[in-house]
Amino acid sequence: MRPRRLKNEINVVPYIDVMLVLLVIFMVTAPMMTTASIDVPSVAKAPQPPADALQVLIHADGSLALLAPNANERTVSRSELSEAILAAQERNPEQAVVIAGHRSVKYEAVLKVMDDLQRQEVKRIGLLVQPTGK
């Protein structure tokens, strides 16, 4: 009797089956995936902000400014912003506050300002957008 020789072959058929199943799964799910792209500051038709709204401006360098109705823009820190808005809220509890962020500002800066306003219990907070016609 002859001794049996060992085969050095790998059966790859099951691996090909698994690969084809994964390929089909990825082909079906790939079109369903959405990519996040945020470019918020422009819309087709934007309503005008309330005329008496306080505007919190976030400049490209991250500095804050406050623009009150019938007043000039003044640069403020976050603590000064809180004090100014609290003072305005004492005079008028329904005072609207609009946040206007520069296009290149990180969204995190806008969220921080919005969070500060919500902690101060400002009831009317909005985001100012620029119409696409400009």
Image (tube, rainbow, N blue to C red):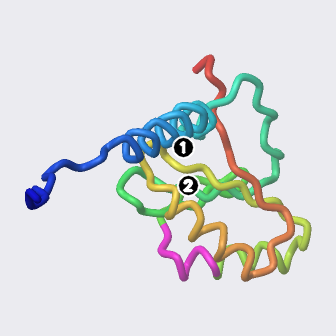
Residue nearest the viewer, comparing 103 with 87:
103
Q: Quick check: 134 above or below 49?
A: above
Left or right relative to 9: residue 129:
right
Q: Position of residue 66 (x, y in %)?
A: 59, 61
Mark 1 residue element: loop
Left or right relative to 106: residue 129:
right
Front disc: 2 or 1: 1
Main secondary structure found in the magenta portion: helix
Quarter placement of the N terminus: bottom left
Instruction: Specify few, some or many for label 2: CA neighbours under 10 Å numbering under 14, 14-19, or 20 or more.
Output: many
The amino acid type found where label 2 is placed reads Leu
Q: Position of residue 96 (x, y in %)?
A: 82, 59
Mark 2–mark 1 Cα distance, whole angstroms, equals 25 Å
Q: Position of residue 3 (x, y in %)?
A: 9, 61
Q: Position of residue 109 (x, y in %)?
A: 50, 63
Q: Which residues are magenta?
A: 76-82
* Residue annotated with mark 1: 36
In the current view of this chain or complex, which residue is farthest to the front? Answer: 1
Quarter placement of the C terminus: top right
The amino acid type found where label 1 is placed reads Ala
* Residue annotated with mark 2: 57
Identity of the residue drawn at 68% across and 45% down: 128
Chain-order first, disc 2 or disc 1: 1
Q: Quick check: 119 above or below 52?
A: below
Q: Quadrant of residue 6?
A: bottom left
